[in-house]
Image (cartoon, rainbow, N blue to C red):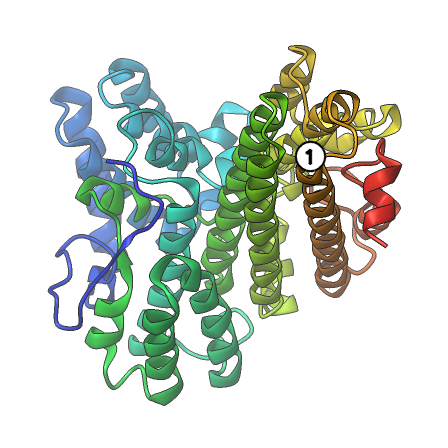
Amino acid sequence: MRTDTVRARLPGTPLHPAGPGAGCSTALTRDDVGAMVRNAVREWSTAPGNALTLARVVTREVRWIGSASLDADLLADLAAVRADHRGRDPRLDAFLDSVLARYDGRYWNRTYLCLPLLEQLVEGPRAPLTHAGLVALLAADIVRSELCASRRGMPVSPLGRPDGRTLRTRLRHAIRLLTADLGPDAATALLGAVAADPLATLPDVLARLPAAPAPWATEWLDVSALPVSTVHDETFFIRALQAHEMLYGTAARLIGDATACALAGHPGLAADLVDRATETVDRGQSLFRMVATMRYEAFHSFREHTDGASAIQSEQYKRFEVRCGTPPPDRLDCPAFEQVPSVSAELGTGRESLTDAWQVLQRRRPGDPGTARLTAGMAALEASHRRWKGTHVTVATRMLGEARGSGHTSGVSYLRSWLDHRLFWALPEVAAADR
């Protein structure tokens, strides 16, 4: 059953033995992990077994050495398993497609973030989560993995876990992302536990984190972070970017629904949906503040292995943008849209945007109070989006400097060149309300 929220665990609730939190007590050697993955692939080659078991042992190997360092023979064997058993389990198919993306020569943002697998948790009639619910679980996993790294005594270093001050800042921003789903009381309790001494009461802190309504969603979420390196901050970075995709997936859906309401002659309902989209974009700024806790040395250590995968390839963000209004020709011709053909294809279907719907309302019902409220809501969304872009540029400037973007753009200068672009550029009335 789909849910807009996720379940909060009560303190003292046992953790799933193979799910989030289990890794805090796992003690395996490099030889153990290498033997496990070789044996699992060998067994699957002759007698396929449990898909999740295979995904787990491959994930352990990835997290020991980084996906960029996986053995060529192992990749070839995994490709053979995929070819022989594609269709047996769509979640395993999506997982292996992400693991093998570099081997296949189609490595990009979607595969780096394992989005084909995550999308199976939020799309389709049997999906157990919405995009917003998945954001909460991703934020919870950041809290969990950071605290477990501290519990295991991982060294504090630029490439290891962060110092205590950085850790607390990172955790505060992650928990604030949970507030909308768990409610202020539960989030406040989590913040209090983290501010006190979370390592002293780690089981209680972990038990307060949210859980997916379906166990299989928890289990597959656990194998959806596939870092290219062994740098500690990279897993946190992946989870933050995954949450970004889910937030903008929520915003795109809300704008699509608002457009339908406006075209049906219900501007008040459309305004309510736009207000919810604005709240979602506002949450996106918390993500950038959290990403800002990443150390410069850590980012540049793993970034050398992510060339070809870039946030500029974010399909959900571009989908949100085009559902607000068809961008002008120069925007459509820029690298941001050249690298997201699925969004360009959506534009080609003639789907009406919120800008189109607003113009229809103005012709049919000029001076309508509901339309005026919708205009104000669109202006608030524009302002929120502009703040989001400014925060993005600030964080990117600190992390990238003058380096080129991994999506083959000029980097920060490219982001700056679009700071003044507006979602509702074709509606001067919205721009006037935004002043």
Residue 230 seen in the figure: no
In the rendered structure, the answer to whether residue 4 lies left or right of residue 207 reads right
Q: Which quadrant, please, contains the C terminus? A: bottom right
Name of the residue lying farthest toward the bottom = 196
Name of the residue lying farthest toward the top = 349
Say which element carries label 1.
helix
Task: Between residue 41 and residue 317, name the one nearer to us.
Answer: 317
Crowding near pointer 1: few (<14 within 10 Å), some, many (20+)?
many
In the image, residue 290 sits, relative to residue 317, either above or below, namely: below
* x, y percent for residue 249: 52, 38
Q: Which quadrant, please, contains the N terminus? A: top left
Task: Between residue 161 and residue 128, name the one nearer to us.
Answer: 128
Mark 1, residue position: 321
* x, y percent for residue 193: 32, 82
In the rendered structure, the answer to whether residue 140 lies left or right of residue 287 reads left
In the image, residue 340 sits, relative to residue 189, either above or below, namely: above
In the image, residue 87 sits, relative to residue 43, either above or below, namely: above
* x, y percent for residue 131: 43, 41
Q: Quadrant of residue 251?
A: top right
* x, y percent for residue 327: 79, 28
Count of labels shown? Answer: 1
Q: Amino acid at mark 1?
A: Glu
Name the residue: 63% across, 35% down. Answer: 320
Task: Between residue 119 and residue 306, name the one nearer to us.
Answer: 119
Residue 17 seen in the figure: yes
Name the residue: 84% across, 36% down. Answer: 425
